[in-house]
């Protein structure tokens, strides 16, 4: 089993709902256990155009080798209608491997830790929310990079009530049973 962190982003369609559904989809995989999920964040596009993004990060435990996890990320992106008309184009779903245990990989189609991880508030802020003392291999503590990205706009979304009784009344409970991709 390997603990990994995945970054989710979207700024096309019902981006916020897509991210929630994609997390359900990940949790439905028998090869993945979702250990933690950050809050949802609304973020300014960085090096990209289009509407504001929604971003979040999940911490998972997985039996998958890293290349199988990358293939699964691509399959899930495709399931949610991802198209790639040009670099950094607006997208219905982006699923990036941020960290995979303490592995360091530098290959043409897979770089881990994700190469721009330390330059982006939309990744660092949710990562540090989940794991305040997280160490990024070859870089050091994640929170040490927060100051450098403080000018990037990022706003934490209020999460709906997690109380099971109120959740059932307001329909929040249904969120865990819909939107999957099995
Ligand atoms: N690839 C290499 N390493 C990885 C990895 N660790 N995880 C390869 C996932 N994929 C990896 O990916 C392009 C290629 O990177 C793939 O073939 C894969 O094998 P892609 O999903 O087609 O495109 P991408 O994710 O847009 O590329 P990239 O280079 O990862 O872009 P970035 O740097 O992630 O930027 N602003 C806000 N606010 N929020 C965002 O989510 N995202 C981007 C994308 C730009 N600005 C943003 C956001
Ligand atoms: Mg990507």
Image (cartoon, helix red, strand yellow):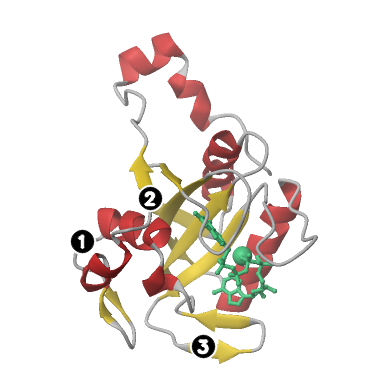
Residue 1 visible in the current orientation: no
Dot placed on the residue nearer the N-terminal end, 2 or 1: 1
Residue 92: x and y in percent read: 67, 46
Q: Secondary structure at mark 3?
A: strand
CB within 8 Å, label 1 to label 3:
no
The image quadrant where one finds ligand 1 is: bottom right
Residue sitting at 59 percent across and 59 percent down?
A: 48
> For this rendering, which residue is in front, 73 or 9?
9
Whether the residue carrying mark 3 lies under 8 Å from ligand 1 is answered with: yes
Location of the C terminus (image quadrant)? top right
Dot placed on the residue nearer the N-terminal end, 1 or 3: 3
Q: Label for residue 55?
A: none
Residue tagged 3: 105
Residue 61: x and y in percent read: 42, 63
Vertical placement of 41 versus 31: above or below?
above
In this picture, residue 65 sits left or right of residue 136:
right
Q: Quadrant of residue 69?
A: bottom right
Residue sitting at 69 percent across and 58 percent down?
A: 89
Q: Label for residue 132?
A: 1
Q: Callout 2: 10 Å neighbours few (<14), some, many (20+)? A: some
> For this rendering, which residue is in front, 156 or 17?
156
Q: Quadrant of residue 5?
A: bottom left
Residue tagged 2: 153
């Amino acid at each position: 089993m390997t603990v990994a962190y995945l970054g989710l982003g979207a700024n096309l369609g019902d981006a916020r709902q897509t991210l929630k559904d994609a997390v359900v989809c990940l949790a439905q995989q028998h090869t993945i256990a979702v250990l933690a999920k950050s809050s949802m964040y609304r973020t300014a596009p960085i090096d990209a155009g289009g509407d504001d993004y929604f971003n979040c990060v999940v911490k998972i435990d997985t039996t998958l080798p890293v290349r199988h996890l990358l293939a699964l990320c691509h399959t899930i992106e495709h399931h949610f209608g991802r198209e790639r008309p040009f670099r950094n184009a607006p997208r219905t779903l982006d699923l990036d491997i941020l960290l995979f245990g303490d592995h360091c990989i530098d290959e043409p189609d897979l770089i881990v830790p994700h190469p721009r991880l330390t330059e982006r508030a939309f990744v660092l802020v949710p990562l540090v929310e989940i794991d305040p003392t997280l160490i990024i291999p070859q870089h050091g503590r994640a929170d040490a990079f927060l100051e450098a990205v403080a000018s990037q706009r990022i706003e934490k979304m209020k999460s709906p009530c997690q109380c099971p009784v109120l959740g059932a009344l307001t329909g929040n409970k249904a969120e865990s049973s819909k939107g999957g991709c099995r």
